[in-house]
Image (cartoon, helix red, strand yellow):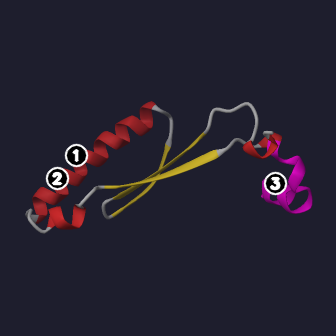
Amino acid sequence: EKIVHKMIHSPLTIQSDLQTAVILQLDICSFTKMSQTMGAIDVARMVHKVFSQFDDRVQQLQLFKMDTVGDAYIVTGWLPCEQDWVTAE
């Protein structure tokens, strides 16, 4: 709420308060085609195995898992930068 208020009333002064966020969406390649040739349990096991490995790595890197939707895995994090990209020359 505080950030939204700042963005509305003084958008050019908030960049020093923020870091640059990154959102990444990953999809399993050829998932639809692959899932048509596998049993439902095998598909569920495969997705669970892949997403569990992603979960472990997300925790190690101190990222935030936003959601999983079907075969999509969505994660976010902060870029380690001194200066927000808006203020960069």
Q: Circles 1 and 2: CB distance less than 8 Å?
A: yes
Which quarter of the rendered picture does the N terminus lie within?
bottom right
Q: Residue furthest front?
A: 89
Query: Which residue corresponds to the image point at 29% horizontal and 44% vertical from the top-left?
Result: 52
Q: Amino acid at mark 1?
A: Lys
Secondary structure beneath disc 2?
helix
| Numbered mark located on residue 2 in the image | 3
Q: Is residue 86 left or right of residue 30?
A: right
Between the residue at mark 3 and the residue at mark 1, the CA separation in whole angstroms equals 40 Å
> What's the magenta bit mostly, secondary-structure-wise?
helix
Q: Nearer the viewer, mark 3 or mark 2?
A: 2
- Bounds of the magenta span? 1-15
Residue lying at 78% horizontally and 47% vertically, measured from the top left:
86
Identified at 30% across, 48% down, the residue is 51
Q: Position of residue 57 (x, y in %)?
A: 38, 35
Q: Is residue 72 magenta?
A: no
Q: Which mark is residue 33?
A: none
Q: Which residue carries the number 1 mark? A: 49
Q: Local crowd at mark 3 within 10 Å, few (<14), some, or many (≥20)?
A: few
Label 2, on which residue?
45
The C terminus, quarter of image: top right
**CA gap, disc 1 and disc 2:** 6 Å
Figure check: 78 above or below 44: above
Q: Regarding mark 1 in the picture, which secondary structure is present there?
A: helix
Above or below, 68 relative to 50: below
